[in-house]
Image (tube, rainbow, N blue to C red):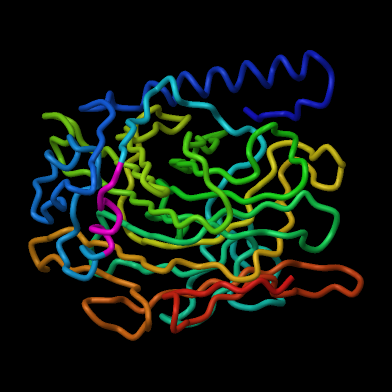
Amino acid sequence: MSVQGGHGAPGRESSRLDVLADLTAEMQARIVPPLCGEQQFEPSFPPFDPDLPDADALHFGIPPSPPDPAARQLWQRMVAPPLRILPFRPEDVRLRSDIVHGLLRGFGQGEDRADAGPEQAGAAAPPGRLASSANWSGAAILARRGERYIQVLGSWAVPAVRAGKGDGPWVCSTWIGLDGLRRWMTSMPQMGTTQSLGDTGEPRPANFPWFQWWLRGRSLQLPVPINIHVSPGDRVYCAVTRLPVNQPQPGQENHVQFFFRNGSTATHLVYRAPPDDRMGAPVPSRGASAQWILERPTALHDSPNGKVAEGDLYPLPDFAVAGPDSFAASLAPSPDFAPVVATLEAPALAPSLGFRTPRLLRMVERLRGPARVAVIAVPSRDTVRPIRVTYRG
């Protein structure tokens, strides 16, 4: 199943709309009904208790509090009043049909190797070393010895973008997510913002927040825009949380809560694990990695100017510098290990508070005339941001 562009024959456009309608209905069915309606927390409201039980946090519409004090500082900024929380409802689903996010596309260990494609886990470099990818740049941290991440939190400023190389349209997305770094990680919930310049064939805002649960074995999956306005320079907060068994209701499991905030407005939803196309069984996230990524999304149809073909990665816009100002990922308790949190808190990336050395991912592009590989986005350690991604064009 594919979404064909809306610039061809009427029959093709009708087929595209039918596919979107089917996907919309399927995604609406995966949204768990919210436990409460709109809520307003004024400045006089006392700070949320960091020891608030998970069930109470979900009732308020906020992410569960992480166990580590350093990560809690980010969480407290994320939920601090004044705060208006709007539940995301099934009828709010409006799919974006011009872009899709996906698994890391790696170039392997050497730049002279052919692009290994979307099935290749291109982050096998030793800890702290640069790995190359065709579509991701940023940093990821891996759980070890059976441990699993249950939550990832992040805040960053929405990048302002300018025209990059080529004729456009230019698109990049900035997001946090769980899993997706390695080939066997088949289920990846993610959430963030997209920034674009030029006509992608979609009459929607150039800057918008979204969530997506990517799944290997799904023929088509689209980001779901969130109805909160964002502009370049806005500081946004995102949280993706794997919920424990019996949350938000008794007998439920493998659900994920998505939370997004810009300014004093936030939204939240709980989402059921999506099924694969072959067996129809839900495929839950395992929490084997956590990451902050700047991505080149994939085009789902030809661009109106004919410069980007269906299935191509969009050209990268000039975003100057991007990266999270705070990031934290919580590990689940296990029989052998106490709860621990991996944190990337400015001003340094030195190991502390259980921090795991990240895999740094630079984005590269294969060029012709002469044939070569060019680095177009590179991450580095920063005294201001835990990860700094710089546009190289």
Q: Is residue 215 visible?
A: no
* Extreme residue toward the right, this view: 369
Q: How many marks?
A: 0
Residue that appears at 34% across and 86% down? 350
Nearer-the-camera pick, 389 or 212: 389
For the record, the magenta segment spans 74-83
Is 379 placed above or below 280 here? below
Q: Main secondary structure of the magenta part?
A: helix
Residue that appears at 44% across and 84% down? 383
Give the quarter of the figure containing the N terminus.
top right
Give residue 58's position: percent from left, percent from top: 19, 38
Magenta span includes 171? no
Dividing the picture into quadrants, the one containing residue 213 is top left
Give residue 367's position: percent from left, percent from top: 82, 68
In the image, is 53 to the left or to the right of 271? left
Give the quarter of the figure containing the C terminus.
bottom right
Q: Is residue 257 visible?
A: yes
Residue that appears at 40% across and 46% down? 189
